[in-house]
Image (cartoon, rainbow, N blue to C red):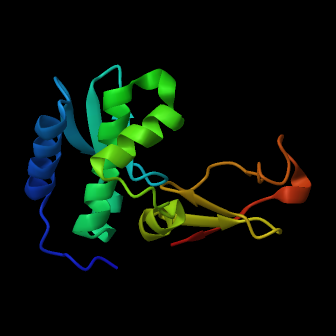
Amino acid sequence: EKSDSSVTNAQIEQMAFELFQAHGVINYSFGFDRAIRRAGQCDYSKKRITLSKHFVATADLDQIHQVLLHEVAHALVGRSVGHGKLWKQQASLLGYRHEKLDGAVIAESSAKYLGECAAGHKHYRMRRPNSVLSCKLCAPSFSRSHLINWRAN
């Protein structure tokens, strides 16, 4: 649960631009998106870093700062590096702690529909599925033996 409920989007934007300036991230913009499976994104082609509005609604200031550092590291090292050694070194230099965020927390708090297969794999949707879906973790192609049961969240 969010412990720093007084954090505004304007404060987050200010934090982002201060990090951009401090670390030489040039010509990048910042914004919020509607992602439910990730906290942040660095879009190299648009030169834009975004945070999920669902993530910031449940995160505290430190978690938000850490995700911004993660994305700033991506902006600094470039697209081809991924999460490899160079990115890890850059992220560490910025103060990123490499703590894994549980994307399910973001998804569960924001998804309008929750699904589960017989094996217990969880699935999240913003809209009600309009067709029968099967679990790709259980079977790579559609399988009637691995159907997902949906319920409103």
| Left or right: 144, with 78 as reference point | right
The quadrant in which residue 49 appears is top left
Q: Can residue 41 be seen?
A: no
Residue at the spot 83% in from the left edge and 42% down from the top edge: 140
| Left or right: 112, with 61 as reference point | right
Residue at the spot 44% in from the left edge and 63% down from the top edge: 106
| Left or right: 62, with 125 as reference point | left
Q: Can residue 115 be seen?
A: yes
Q: Position of residue 112 (x, y in %)?
A: 47, 64
Residue at the spot 74% in from the left edge and 61% down from the top edge: 148
Q: Front-most of 61 and 116? A: 61
| Left or right: 78, with 82 as reference point | left
Q: Position of residue 44 (x, y in %)?
A: 35, 24
Query: Compared with residue 16, is residue 82 higher up or lower down, i.e. above or below?
Result: above
Q: Position of residue 9 (x, y in %)?
A: 14, 56
Q: Position of residue 61 (x, y in %)?
A: 22, 66
